[in-house]
């Protein structure tokens, strides 16, 4: 028999009662704290519940008759049930004057419902782990529930749960706690503590520790290398959850900061990693070899092909355009043509793959929306224009230097770079530089009011994956970018950002954003929504997993 994975401990117990020999582990659902948020502590006298209800049986299981009875007991409060279809409305008759019966809503519409209610009620007669209760608590709704399933586990001491049904205890609790807004933070933190994604992933790891398939992951760099971290390493726990045992070997170790490390340890480790790659390819059996950006020698590629090992090759830059190493074009063609499947970040890179006789899958570089989040901006003060990148990409800042200098002559603002070359300078501008540090990335982005991504219109720049823009999106920062390559696809001008080509366009758009804080807020919120819905790690991984499993 396989392993059962109920989302609630109550369901696991029921399963074991039915079949005492069953194997089951409780793995709770994930609740995304970045999607369900709140700011307003003062709420109207309003209690809500959500249940898709199409028949009387469902109505009774979810305790909606009890919800109606609670509404009758509190005529000075407003009550609303979301999810009532026309065919069951008669079951609530006579409908109390303070009870609203609303039809089902789209998932994306629920947040504002939760944010506008003081209490959320889950009065079920039978239950597992109700997602809507968790979402409402993340939005600051004080929870009310019955002691069935995992409702009491979820609520804990942050709300009110009852055993035997009767509205009196709930009525008293609601009246006593309606204005106790300090409870809302405790309610939200309860869900973050119990049902965060990391806990679910860790539990899956424990269940599938043995894995079902073996994956060798070869990357150009380590965690300090952006492409390796974003397009490969952050997926490792996700692969493990889906039954893969992942063994990672980088081409180079992390860059050391001291002289001994740079000139002695680093070269030795680099050679050791190359040797280790060769040994692992030749001596071990792999179901999948995932190669990110690097080239491996032809005889190893042939060896894997002869063994019918599935090769997935991923790259997000124009590796084949390198005047210093002209043979890189042939090496890229070999990797592309020999791979079982190729993954690229842009349509421009896909065109190159087509010339090699391979049809790739386009998956953008994912952004960690759960890590890079919007931060509160001061309502007044000097705005900050920001750029985040690496030392070698800071040469692209030349594109926007004149507009920034012209802007600085007219308006006060700060220009912040994160990760630029240590020697980078720009005259006539209030300039600040910070080194890029993974753990500081969210805080650094939080200092920016406007994010920029200038690029020259060159073959190499057209192949860039636009990851800076996605970072700005995730952090809720309005962005301005050069209309080069994938930037033209990611940015919807006037909706989630702006495109600027000439010096005059850069000046005019930046001027508009500096002067209009409300516009910055609107564009930033739209970008955040776009990041979550189109470029989040979960969405991109599902596309990648389909390729790996094919």
Image (cartoon, rainbow, N blue to C red):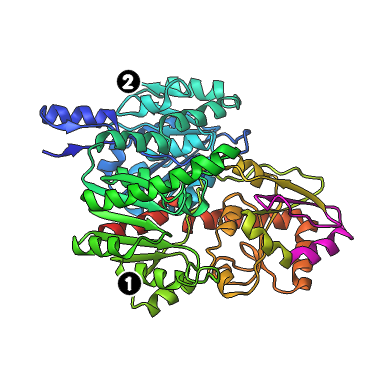
Q: Secondary structure at mark 1?
A: helix
- The residue where tag 1 is placed is 337
Q: Which residues are magenta?
A: 400-429
Q: Decide which of 287, 416 is in the foreground and name it.
A: 287
| Quadrant where the N terminus is found in the figure | top left
Rendered position, 273 above or below 486: above
Rendered position, 254 above or below 477: above
Q: Quadrant of residue 447?
A: top right
Q: Is residue 494 visible?
A: yes
Are the residues at dot 2 and dot 1 in contact (C-beta closer than 8 Å)?
no
Mark 2 and mark 1 lie on one chain; the one further toward the N terminus is 2
Task: Give the x, y percent position of residue 243.
Answer: 25, 45
Q: Is residue 452 left or right of residue 2?
A: right
Q: Could you tell me how far apart the alpha carbons at marks 2 and 1 are, in whole angstroms? A: 68 Å
Q: Residue at x 42, y 26 (%)?
A: 155
Q: Is residue 129 left or right of residue 134?
A: left
Q: Secondary structure at mark 2?
A: loop
In reply to whether residue 408 is colored magenta, the answer given is yes
- The residue where tag 2 is placed is 164
Looking at the rendered image, the disc whose residue lies closer to the viewer, 2 or 1, is 1
Q: Residue at x 44, y 62 (%)?
A: 315
Q: Quadrant of residue 407?
A: bottom right
Task: Give the x, y percent position of residue 14.
Answer: 19, 29
Task: Give the x, y percent position of residue 498.
Answer: 66, 66
| Quadrant where the C terminus is found in the figure | bottom left
Q: Residues within 10 Å of mark 1 (few under 14, many from 20)?
A: some
Q: Residues within 10 Å of mark 2 (few under 14, many from 20)?
A: few
């Amino acid at each position: 028999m396989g392993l059962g994975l109920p989302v609630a401990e109550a369901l696991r117990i029921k399963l074991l009662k039915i079949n005492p020999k069953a194997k089951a582990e409780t793995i709770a659902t994930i609740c995304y704290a970045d999607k369900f948020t709140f700011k307003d502590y003062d709420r109207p006298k309003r209690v809500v519940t959500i249940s898709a209800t199409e028949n009387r049986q469902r109505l009774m299981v979810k305790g909606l008759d009890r919800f109606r009875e609670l509404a009758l007991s509190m005529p000075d409060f407003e009550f609303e049930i979301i999810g009532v279809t026309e065919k069951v409305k008669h079951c609530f008759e006579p409908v109390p004057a303070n009870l609203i019966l609303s039809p089902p809503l789209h998932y994306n519409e629920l947040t504002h419902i939760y944010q506008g209610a003081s209490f959320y009620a889950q009065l079920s007669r039978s239950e597992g782990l109700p997602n809507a209760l968790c979402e409402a608590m993340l939005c600051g709704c004080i929870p009310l529930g019955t002691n069935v399933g995992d409702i009491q586990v979820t609520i804990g001491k942050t709300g009110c749960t009852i055993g035997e049904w009767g509205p009196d205890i709930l009525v008293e609790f609601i009246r006593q706690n309606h204005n106790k807004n300090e409870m809302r933070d405790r309610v939200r933190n309860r869900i973050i503590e119990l049902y965060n994604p990391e806990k679910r992933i860790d539990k899956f790891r424990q269940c599938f520790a043995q894995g079902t398939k073996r994956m060798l992951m070869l990357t150009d760099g380590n965690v300090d290398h952006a492409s390796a971290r974003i397009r490969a390493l952050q997926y490792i726990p996700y692969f493990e959850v889906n039954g893969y045992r992942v063994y990672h070997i980088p081409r180079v170790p992390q860059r050391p900061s001291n002289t001994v490390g740079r000139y002695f340890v680093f070269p030795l480790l680099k050679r050791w990693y190359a040797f280790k790659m060769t040994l692992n390819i030749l001596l071990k059996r792999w179901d999948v070899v995932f190669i990110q950006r690097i080239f491996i020698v032809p005889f190893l590629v042939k060896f894997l092909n002869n063994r019918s090992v599935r090769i997935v090759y991923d790259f997000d830059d124009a590796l084949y355009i390198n005047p210093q190493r002209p043979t890189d074009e042939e090496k890229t063609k070999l990797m592309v043509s020999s791979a079982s499947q190729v993954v690229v970040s842009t349509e421009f890179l896909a065109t190159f793959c087509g010339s090699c006789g391979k049809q790739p899958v386009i998956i953008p570089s994912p952004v960690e929306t759960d890590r890079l989040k919007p931060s509160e901006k001061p309502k007044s003060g000097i705005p900050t224009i920001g750029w985040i990148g690496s030392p070698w990409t800071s040469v692209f800042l030349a594109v926007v230097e004149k507009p920034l200098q012209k802007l600085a002559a007219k308006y006060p603002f700060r220009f912040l770079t994160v990760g630029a070359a240590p020697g980078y300078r720009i005259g006539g501008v209030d300039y600040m530089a910070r080194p890029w540090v993974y753990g500081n990335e969210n805080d650094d982005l939080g200092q920016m009011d406007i994010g920029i991504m200038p690029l020259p219109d060159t073959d190499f720049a057209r192949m860039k994956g636009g990851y800076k823009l996605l970072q700005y999106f995730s952090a809720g920062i309005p962005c301005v970018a050069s209309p080069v390559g994938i930037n033209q696809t990611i940015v919807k001008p006037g909706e989630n950002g702006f495109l600027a080509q000439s010096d005059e366009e850069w000046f005019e758009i930046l001027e508009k954003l500096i002067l209009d804080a409300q516009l910055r807020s609107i564009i930033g919120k739209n970008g955040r929504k776009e990041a979550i819905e189109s470029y989040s790690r979960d969405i991109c991984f599902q596309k990648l997993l389909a390729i790996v499993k094919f």
